Amino acid sequence: MSFWQHLEELRWHVLRSIIAILAFSILAMMNRKILFDDILLAPKDADFITNRWLCKLADLVSTPALCFKDFSLNIVNLSMSGQFMTHMYISVAAGLVLAVPYVLWEIWRFVKPALKLRERKYSGGAVIVMSLLFLIGILFSYFLIVPLTLNFLGSYTVSDMVQNQISLKSYLSTVVSLTFATGLVFELPVFVYFFSRIGLLTPSFMRKSRKYALVIILIIAAIITPPDVFSQTMVAIPLYGLYEISIFISARVHRQNRELAG
């Protein structure tokens, strides 16, 4: 195809992706109670499922800091149009998250004609893998990182004379950014696969960089969790596990590249 034909093809893929995002956004907008009360605002209370599990775990391992029995954030709206604009923004964000598998499929459909038969074979399941990793990352963040972060930041005070009243915008910004960022972080094995395929990453380099990767992972875990070793370990272990899986993926791709070159 000519350049303009490629451009026209891309335009239709982008258009269909935007329509999917808008459709899911409208669906989210129509289910306001589920979106806000049952999902986004649920982690702020002590009876959230993760907080209850942490209290049981705190009793087992004798770590009282993990249990937040009396925790509950006071969320307030500070502007006249704040709740309406927040409803619009969150609906679009939810539509984007829900449409991720379809958007990835549209991207793959656009790229597919340019791939060789062998490349199509190896990339055929990429959409499913990327969607699953993104979903796992979101669930991991929502059920673990978000509650831990809210409990730490929401209860932290510089003085007993200062009470925390969290704005709706600040609360939702924290929840959405953490959840979306973790979903992207869980795509690490996919990025390693493609970078290894084009020769930018090698398994030997990743093995030599283990100690640096561990330090970075511990720093990330320390930032997004309460200041106790147990909580940081709960977050750091899955992230480091992703790094080790990525080394295995890189080694397999590197071996395939050598077989093709030979």
Image: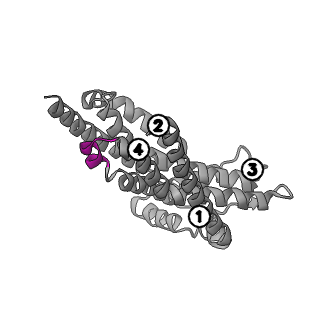
Apparent side of residue 141 relative to residue 60 in the rendered image (left or right):
right
Relative to the observer, which residue lies in front, 51 or 77?
77
Q: Are marks 1 and 4 in contact (CB under 8 Å)?
A: no
Q: Are marks 3 and 1 in contact (CB under 8 Å)?
A: no
Alpha carbon distance from label 2 to label 4:
15 Å
Residue 127: in magenta span: no
- Is residue 227 in sight in this rendering? no
Q: Amino acid at mark 3?
A: Asp
Q: x and y percent of residue 154 in the render?
A: 66, 53
Q: Amino acid at mark 2?
A: Ser
**Quadrant where the image shows the N terminus:** top left
Relative to the observer, which residue lies in front, 243 or 57?
243
Alpha carbon distance from label 1 to label 4:
24 Å
Which residue is identified by label 2?
2
Which residue is identified by label 3?
160
Element marked by disc 4? helix
How crowded pointer 2 is (Cα within 10 Å; few <14, some 14-19, many 20+) is rated as few
Label 2 vs label 1, nearer the camera = 2
Alpha carbon distance from label 4 to label 3:
58 Å
Q: Are marks 3 and 2 in contact (CB under 8 Å)?
A: no
Apparent side of residue 260 relative to residue 179 in the rendered image (left or right):
left
Element marked by disc 3? loop
**Which is the main secondary structure of the residues drawn in magenta?**
helix
Residue found at x 65% / y 66%: 26
Q: Are marks 2 and 1 in contact (CB under 8 Å)?
A: no
Which residue is identified by label 4?
111
Q: Earlier in the sequence, mark 3 or mark 1?
A: 1
How crowded pointer 3 is (Cα within 10 Å; few <14, some 14-19, many 20+) is rated as few
Which residue is identified by label 1?
24
Q: Earlier in the sequence, mark 2 or mark 4?
A: 2
Residue found at x 64% / y 57%: 92
